[in-house]
Amino acid sequence: MAKNDKTEKQILEEISNKLSKLIALSAIQGKAKVEQIKILTTLEFSNSEISKLTGIPKGTIDSTRAKLK
């Protein structure tokens, strides 16, 4: 198998991850930053993933999540 060849399982995992991100983005559309963080936390995204999806700095997410506990 060549280096760029992916197994069916790898392809399905990539598709699943992309669909999860699309659903998450749809769920937070138009919401305030704190709501976005709450929703994405509930969906088990890491602080780094939340930052990448929302553009909210990771430090802001860290402190917001700490306040929510």
Image (tube, rainbow, N blue to C red):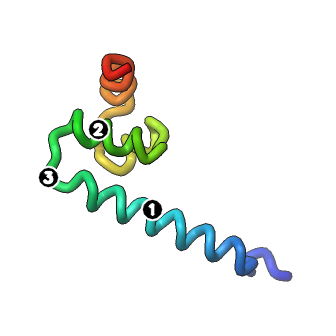
Q: Residue at x 53, y 68 (%)?
A: 16
Question: Residue 19 appears at what percent x and percent y?
Answer: 44, 68
Vertical side of 59 occupied by 48: above or below? below
Q: Nearer the viewer, mark 2 or mark 3?
A: 3
Q: Residue at x 58, y 69 (%)?
A: 14
Q: Earlier in the sequence, mark 2 or mark 1?
A: 1
Q: Is residue 25 left or right of residue 46?
A: left
As measured in the structure, the alpha-carbon distance from the residue carrying label 1 to the one carrying label 3 is: 18 Å
Q: Residue at x 52, y 63 (%)?
A: 17
- 60 or 66: nearer the viewer: 66
The residue pinned by badge 3 equals 30
Q: In this figure, what is the number of numbered marks?
A: 3
Q: Mark 3 falls on what kind of element?
A: loop
As measured in the structure, the alpha-carbon distance from the residue carrying label 2 to the one carrying label 3 is: 14 Å
Q: Mark 1 falls on what kind of element?
A: helix
Q: Nearer the viewer, mark 2 or mark 1?
A: 1
Amino acid residing under circle 2? Ile
